[in-house]
Image (tube, grey):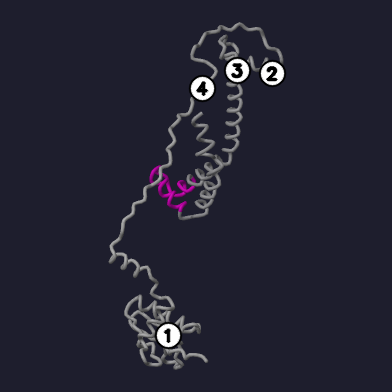
């Protein structure tokens, strides 16, 4: 049975047959392979070259004929296996029905009950104290549910200097009011200033300059940003930072 199983699965004929036949065709059409095989035959068998070539071609033909007839052999094996399985099953059923024990009569009882012809049989009854109504049931383990507990609040007063530092860090340094305050300090009494005067040394200065330009273009701030008109000087570059070039002017009061 192990050999038959391997023949029908891993070593299945139809899985490799086509590749092997294609390989044989390639060898038969390759004169170099035929000559190499003939040289080996002549050396091993002590034949002349013509006899060795003839022997190689005969062996190739024999291999092709064997692979052509293998499907018929496999079909014959399948038929014999089917007959063997059927005979083995019938013999097993016969042996089961000849067994006088209760487990050997189960199939016979089922068949008779299906036909409505239940026979009168005598059974030996034994008392088993372990069998009861719920002997297969195991009650789940009950665990005590955890009761919710409120977490106590711990109040801790921060020192005044720490509170002041935290408040300073939490304040947005780029709000409109703080930007207008920055522009007021930058301009002083002057009516305007160039973007080259705006600090641009670190990331905070760069972000402030971007907000400064954005608020100066929306018309809602107390100052106005006027972009540069010179095409050759449209950006201010300082280190890795680049911002638009132009002038920051104090907005004139209307009215």
> Would residue 245 be counted in the magenta stretch?
no
User: Disc 1, disc 4: CB below 8 Å?
Assistant: no
Select label 2 or label 3 by which is in front.
2
Marks 1 and 3, how far apart in space?
97 Å
| Helix, strand or loop for the magenta stretch, by majority | helix
Q: Residue at x 44, y 83 (%)?
A: 213
Disc 1 vs disc 2: which is toward the camera?
A: 1
N-term mark: 1 or 2: 2
**Magenta stretch?**
33-54
Gap in angstroms between the C-alphas marked 4 and 3 = 32 Å
- Chain-order first, disc 2 or disc 3: 3
Placement of 173 over or under 95, stated as above or below: below
**Quarter assignment of residue 148:** top left
Using a 10 Å C-alpha cutoff, classify the residue at mark 2 as few (fewer than 14 neighbours), some (14 to 19) or many (20 or more): few
**Mark 3 crowd level (few <14, some 14–19, many ≥20, 10 Å Cα):** some
**How far is the residue under mark 2 from the one under mark 3?**
17 Å
Q: Is residue 53 highlighted in magenta?
A: yes
- Could you tell me which secondary element the residue under label 2 belongs to? helix
Identify the mark nearer the N-term, 1 or 3: 3
Q: To which residue does mark 4 refer?
A: 136
Reading the image, the residue beneath label 2 is 114
Q: Of tags 1 and 3, which is closer to the observer? A: 1
Of the pair 208 and 125, the residue shown nearer to us: 208
């Amino acid at each position: 049975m192990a050999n038959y199983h391997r023949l029908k699965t891993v070593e299945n004929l139809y899985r490799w047959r086509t590749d092997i036949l294609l390989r044989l065709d390639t060898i038969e059409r390759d004169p170099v392979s035929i000559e190499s095989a003939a040289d080996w035959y002549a050396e091993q068998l002590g034949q002349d070259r013509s006899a060795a070539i003839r022997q190689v071609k005969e062996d190739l033909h024999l291999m092709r004929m064997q692979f052509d007839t293998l499907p018929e052999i496999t079909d014959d094996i399948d038929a014999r296996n089917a007959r063997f399985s059927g005979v083995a099953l019938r013999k097993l059923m016969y042996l089961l029905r000849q067994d006088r024990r209760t487990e050997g009569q189960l199939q016979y009882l089922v068949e008779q009950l299906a036909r409505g012809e239940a026979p009168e049989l005598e059974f030996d009854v034994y008392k088993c104290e372990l069998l009861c109504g719920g002997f297969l049931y195991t009650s789940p383990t009950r665990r005590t549910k955890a009761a919710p507990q409120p977490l106590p609040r711990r109040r801790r007063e921060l020192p005044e200097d720490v509170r002041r530092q935290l408040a300073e860090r939490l304040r947005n340094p780029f709000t409109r009011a703080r930007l207008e305050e920055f522009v007021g300090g930058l301009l002083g009494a002057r009516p305007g200033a160039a973007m080259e005067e705006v600090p641009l040394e670190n990331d905070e200065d760069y972000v402030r300059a971007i907000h400064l330009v954005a608020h100066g273009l929306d018309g809602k701030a107390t100052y106005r940003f006027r972009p540069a008109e010179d095409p050759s000087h449209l950006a201010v570059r300082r280190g890795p930072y680049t911002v638009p070039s132009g002038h920051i002017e104090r907005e004139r009061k209307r009215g």
